[in-house]
Image: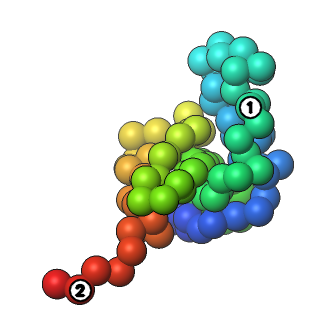
């Protein structure tokens, strides 16, 4: 797998992925999935050859980060992409600490 994971402003791709995974595959209601929390979140998009394959979002409040809406398209599940998304979010949310 040669996915690229980065912070994104491309909410349309994130919403499309979430629609496919959560609403269509997992039968989550659109009202539950498409909430009003996207505007205050940091979004991450995983792509492969410029095609969206996974996404996640993170809310940071003070010293606490909450990760949510992590999704990976069916063809890329089991590849470690979900874990890579989580690690990317953790990496960006941690302050630099001296050791």
- Given residues 64 and 89, the one toward you in this image is 64
Q: Position of residue 87 (x, y in %)?
A: 39, 59
* Residue 16 visible in the picture: yes
Q: Alpha-carbon neighbours of circle 2 within 10 Å: few (<14), some, or many (≥20)?
A: few
> Toward which corner of the image does residue 72 lie, by quadrant?
top right
Q: Position of residue 32 (x, y in %)?
A: 70, 21
Task: Tell me the residue at 76%/30% (across/down).
Answer: 34
Q: Alpha-carbon neighbours of circle 1 within 10 Å: few (<14), some, or many (≥20)?
A: few
Task: Tell me the residue at 76%/62% (across/down).
Answer: 9
Task: Tell me the residue at 78%/58% (across/down).
Answer: 10
Which residue position holds label 2? 98
| Residue with the most extreme front position | 62
Q: Is residue 84 left or right of residue 32?
A: left
Which scheme is used to colour this image of the protein? rainbow
| Residue with the most extreme left position | 99
- Given residues 54 and 61, the one toward you in this image is 61
Give the number of the disc on residue 69. none
Mark 2 or mark 1, which has the lower sequence index?
1
75 vs 26: above or below: below
Q: Secondary structure at mark 1?
A: loop
Give the number of the disc on residue 35. 1
74 vs 87: above or below: above
Q: Secondary structure at mark 2?
A: loop
Q: Position of residue 48 (x, y in %)?
A: 61, 61
53 vs 73: above or below: below
Q: Is residue 82 left or right of residue 72?
A: left
């Amino acid at each position: 797998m040669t996915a690229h994971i980065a912070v994104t402003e491309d909410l349309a791709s994130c919403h499309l992925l979430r629609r496919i995974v959560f609403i269509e595959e997992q039968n989550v209601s659109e009202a539950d999935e498409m909430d009003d929390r996207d505007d205050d979140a940091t979004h991450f998009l995983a792509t492969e050859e410029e095609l969206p394959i996974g996404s996640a979002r993170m809310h940071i409040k003070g010293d606490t980060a909450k990760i949510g809406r992590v999704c990976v398209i069916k063809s890329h599940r089991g590849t470690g992409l979900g874990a890579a998304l989580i690690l990317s979010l953790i990496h960006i949310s941690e302050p630099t600490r001296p050791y």
